[in-house]
Image (cartoon, rainbow, N blue to C red):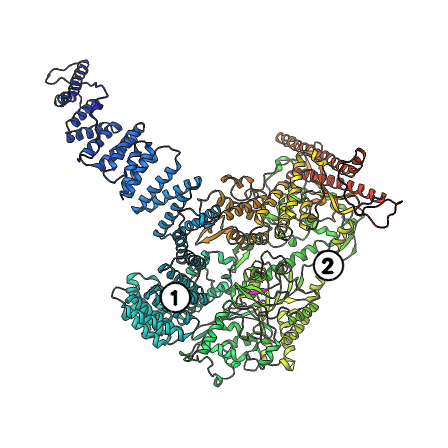
Amino acid sequence: MSESRPTMFNPSQGLSHSFSMASLAEGSSEPISEAEEINEMKSLTEMGNKAMQIRDYTDAIKHYDEALEIDDRNVEVLNARLLAFLEMKDFQMALKDAEYWISLDSDSAEAFRLLGIILVELDRAGDALNAFLTALDLDPERADEMTTYIATVSTFFCEIPKDVLKKIKGMDPYKKLSEVGVCLFHSKHYDLAIKILEAAQKFETNQKGITMRVLLTMANSFSALKKNEQAINLYQECLVTAMATHEQIYQTKSLVNIATLYLEMKDTHQAIVYYEKLLDLEAEISEEAGSEENFPDFWTKELQCGLHLNLSIAYKSIGNMAYAERHAMKYVKLLEKFGIDGRAKSESYHNTGMLNEILGNFNEALKHYSMYLKVCKQSGDKKGMAQAYGCLGSVYAAIRNWQLSITYHEQHIAMAKKFSDPKMLVIAYEMMADTYMVKEDYERAIENYNQMLNSCIRTDYRAKSMAFCKMGNAYRDLKKDQYAIGFYEQASNLAEDFDYVDILTMCHYNLACIKRHSKQMMEIEEARKYFEKLIPLFETKIREHRDEDTYCPSEYHEQLRECYDGIQNVLCKMGNKEECLQYAEAYRKRYITQIKGHPVSFINYGPQTDFWAVDRMSRLVNEQNAAVVYYSVLSHRVLSWVFVPGSGLVRFYSGKSADVEDMEERIQICLDGMKNAPDWKTMQNACEDRCLPLRNAQLQYTRRRNLGLGRDVKQKDSNKDLSDEGTPNKILFNLLLAPVEDILMKLPLKSHLIIIPDKNLYNCPFGMLQDWNARYLCDRFHLTLLPSLFALEKVINNEVNYMKAQDDLDFERSQTRNGGINKVLAQMVMTNAVSPDMESENSHDTYDLRMTANPRLLTSMLGTLPASANSNKGDNNLDEKIPSTQHSPRGGLSSKKPLPGIVSHNTSNKYRSQIGCPLPMEKMLNSHTYTTLTNRTSTGTDITSSTLCITSYQQICDTDTCVVFGNPKLPEKLLLHDCEWRPSDVYLSAAIRELRAVSSYLNVDPITGPDATKEKFKSSVENATVIHIATHGCWKEGYLVFTPGEIKLQSGPPQQSSYILTLEDILHLKLRAKIVVLNVGYGPNRSKECIPPGFALPSAFLNAGAQCVLVSMWPLPNIAMEKFYYHFYTTLHKGALVTDALGAGIKGLRADERFKDPFYWSAWILIGKDVNINLIQIQHAMLDQTLNKTEKELEEESGKELLNPKNVLPIVPTREDNLTTLQECLASLLLHHKGQPEVIPKLIDLLDSALKRLHTEENNRQTTRLPDCVIQSSKAMEMLRLLGFHFQAKGTSLTNPYVVYPHWNKDELLIPSYDALRAILDICYDVDCVQAINDMLPLNQDNISLLVDVLALTKHASDVQLKVTDLSVKPLWQNGKIKNVLTATGFHQIGLLLNFNKTPSQKQLLTAVLQFMLSVSAYKSQVLLYRLDVNLLGKSSASKNGGAPEFSKLPSLTPVILPRNQKLGFSLSESLSNLTDYRLRMSTPWLSRPEKPEEMGEKIKLARSKSDVDEEFKDHMERAKTWHQITVVAQEDDLKANENLAQYGRPRTTPTKVKVRPGSTASQQRTPVKKERLLVIPEVDQRRDYAGFLLQQRMDNIDVRHKTEVMKLYLPYIQTTPSS
């Protein structure tokens, strides 16, 4: 041991313990007593101690040895001997004693302390450190001493700075260990640092700064040891402590390290979460600092730049290219801002250009690649320059500028050769070859792929595998399949050996696509196996991208389509026609289910588990009366299946073309020949432009321009001459219909025929095809088209639902015959007195009222049926959008909703709660007094009268309407696809002419111009039967254009969401339309515009509930369209099938010389189900609706009962109903706050005053005038009336009334309204959030509860990581409107994680939104705004308590519900659909039934409850009277205020000038201009009457609520029993 080493043992310490042990005397052969042993031990120990005192260590050890021979387990003697060995520096013997001591007493801190000293002397510092740590753990009271030892031993491993050594002596143990641990970490002794810091953690301390340092150092040590999980846990613990103490430097270090470790663990999603938290911290620092100059030192510019760079890379790795590009741009701007040059700057431009290239933003990509090249030239980075040339070449290839592209690639290759860089050369040749592949110059592509292969180094197997695969692609495009197979197999072998999954997948895909055309069964079977593996793989990839909301390459969709086509080709060759059809239908369904927002898209399903069996398809066809011809277009053949109702699948045909000919191309040539306009130049002016610019319109224009400027462009031979085979019409007939013509000829003339096309057959005018007798198909059949059998099932269900609704309506009318006697009797349940022993459980049998011969015979045990759970309300409930379904016998999906007229559990619960116990039969004999005045009115209702009661009349009319919508009013410019769009025709003259004509046919007013908004369309079409739309649109993207909303929350042109109706919006509609007519999306400059495969826009309407959609497949002259619509709607006027009307329209066009060419009349197709429409009946229904509306308005205005007496007990809205109304008011106030900023503060003052007056009545003597701004806001007034406010005129003025505050807060809405308005003031600053909340409201309570839970968890439990797949999050994230609210609040998706941006502004917004949602929640507590209570989470109490309560029976007490205004008997004229039409009467038969003991207790309970309710409402009544008296007195005092001031005198002030009326003289008093006139006597009487009216209104409200509460008490006791 060196001399500089600190001394660990101090001899002056001596022995601090006495010794006592029992032993045997040395050398004695006779046993001695225990006392003698003790004495002997004491004697030997004392001798040893004396020897130690005189430093005779040898003699001391001798005595200690003798003592230990007597008792070798005496640790005190052992300790003494160990000290003697230490004094003699016999460390080996001392070590043995120490180890033996520890074996005897492992909890001895002293033993470990001495062991540590000995080990230090033996140069075993590591073991010594462990011993001291153990001693510290066993004896914390000696922590100062032990930590000094530990610090001293640590100097053996690291060099502790001198200043730190000086400070260590004065430090407390905790800080001492932390300093030592940090020094050990810096010396890279990570294990020792962890041990020492773990020991430090055992001390209790309030030194948070040192605690964070300890945690951070430990985490760094674990990270250095690659123990990432332990390191992350410690970093997170440090982060929590730092956030609690607001230590931003430790927050920064923890977040950076956590994100880095997650990247190392390949958990990129979690890494992004913590990088985003760093961004939130940056926003917090920026807000505190005020400017970047005041940023703390630890927030360096390198940290800011690296943060955005890492986020860009991470987002790119998970496929979220949009976020990656956003952060890459921020990284570029930061580099420019901080003046950072060199490689970092050049790579930033490279990264940004690459991301823009992936996203298809080629202009931006060119700009950044050019900057990349420029910076590399400035910095002299030759390799960077070469890479920039290659990137520029790829972008120019994408925009088809071949000359520049090849020039840049050649430069790239030349520089790579110059640098002798094999890797760069491989990339250069590959990029050049890829460009030639895009150019379709396959020979040169192969040459460059060969060069690429030759340039690969021996170990670069991935590049070799990729080269082989791409060479196979080139040979495949050259139709040299054998060469291609050879290269694919080589690539596949390499990829399989080195596990290159992506290359292996591409090889299998291409091999399968080639071998599907083989004639050898072995290769065909091999292709089938490949396809069966590839289809689920591509489906899974696409679904994952959709679920994670990330960028999905278009190649996946193309390859999936090719796989479906390939397996059909293979199965066709194998003769498996049914499985072939299954795959065809599986892909065809994707046209609908892959639309964003479709319910099926939310369900993780695979094609292997979602195939439709052919039997199911046959049953589906059998459910309707149309034959179905199903087509599938493959590369070299067309497949046809024919279904006939009643016969199933009757024909499968495979029409094969020449091997060298592409079937799809052949069909397209024929279609182009059929769609050539006779006079296209005239069409340019005859067709109105209603097209929207395509998303990639600028790119397409650039490509066409570059191709036109190219010199060596190969003209693709796309117009082959097929004239030798006949006309296009004949070719298509022979190809499509001739193989099945024998079946079609057997079908009756004008029978129904459905065609399901494929690919470009979606644009085939099938009706134009002529058979061998020159008959058009449209003349032979009622022809309709559908995208799939899945769509056929949907339209059949739509028709069934419509028929069910009509059946319900007819049945409801039939039950109103003779004043509704049948309905009343059918719903009544007879009851007779039975003895208690006869009572039994009632059955749950249900009956169909329409199947009962005599309604009097119908009995149903309604009283015992369990209540159903409360149904969800609101438009935004996802459960309503995805109806509960079950498999029907035919294999399809059928609704669980019971048929109309069948008393289900739900309806029985409704009847039980509304009817109660009806009267016996003898009480119903007054039905003979009914007299029919008018029988069979237009709506099927009769008018009756009675001498015993007042009958009612309410006509039951159809809900059918017609809607004509279009010609929106558009500004000069709008935002579309993030670009500015200037419509060529702001005012569509032809569209308005068309809409006026159609509206005259339908006898409705068109909705056009400013009224044609998106919101108006949604509300108008819900109940429409016929919908006609003429506006701008886009078939490819499924857009319809309407007038932008009046309220603009953002400056500049209107946003796309304010005027575009998307496919997702259409899917969320609930239509019952029979037909939708679309005249959108065509224009003279887009002659080749056509409906895309799958009929996206019409299919969305079909999926929303429409039965058929009428469209034109190509643009037609405006005059031709108007002529067609005239004949079409005229035919429907008296009732006809839509196909008949379509035929009439076509016939009208063919009769006109101008439009007799098939081009003009063959474009019309009907998509969906052929239905019958009678416009006269629809117009009659609209007239009935107008009459009902007029009657209702007249009754409301006059206050008189014209036809129907008012209910005795009006309906009292529930709290949930009031909250729904409150949501509507708040949504309007939020939306209009920008234009009326003073309304909400005034409302807050009014509510604050109302709450204070409820607790302090003296405040009522103060009067309040209603502000003008509140009067001008209709929703503000509606909200005040909802909360119980009333208003009273002030003097002669009616414009500024007094406020009569509510006298109670019965529905407890005042505080929620107050909180919601306060929250709106914080929300209104975020425009996106305002618009999203306005679109979302009103929201049902279940979704409000889920939303509150998510917001509360995010606010109070930031460590809880939510996922979009969580049960509480999934319904919200899949609901588009709620998702927009969450996104605007600060949430965004990272893979499947749901992250919240915790910037200060977003946290404030989150709190405001949470407060708002809590305010409109009926079940959530405000506690969640301040803290998280897990007991308050979960669904609403209404959902939790969905079961029905157990009701008691009172046999001796018979509650009876009597109809209102009954005179002598029971009135049968009233429907039992509304409980408020009835009175409750208690009937107690005297001694007719024995009374059970438990019944008496139930009666007492009922009586007490009744008494409590009476007392409560009596107090409310007295309070209302007193309240009103105080309020009126206060207002009268205000009127007399001036008189009192005049009596006592006014304070002297400087007189002010007052403007007076002209014409006054000296003898006439001057009259001020603003002087109010005195009220005349009639006006005074009116004011007094109105004051009394307000009081009476409040008294009536209390009375109604009282009756309702009493009714609720008795209803549970109303039971029904079977009739005897």
Name the secondary structure under disc 1: helix
The tag on residue 1370 is none
Q: Nearer the viewer, residue 102 or 960?
A: 102
Q: Mark 2 points at which residue?
A: 1186
Tell me which numbered mark, 1 or 2, is placed earlier along the sequence: 1
Q: Is residue 575 magenta?
A: no
* 1217 lies left or right of 279: right
Q: How crowded is mark 2: few (under 14 residues within 10 Å), some or many (20 or more)?
A: few
Contact? badges 1 and 2 (CB < 8 Å): no
Q: Quadrant of the N terminus?
A: top left
Q: Give the range drawn in magenta.
A: 1038-1043
Q: Mark 1 points at which residue?
A: 374
Does residue 1015 sit above or below 90 in this rendering?
A: below
Q: Which of marks 1 and 2 is in front?
A: 1
The percent position of residue 58, horizontal first and vertical second, equals: 12, 23
Q: Which of 253 and 486 is in front in this view?
A: 253
The percent position of residue 97, horizontal first and vertical second, equals: 18, 28
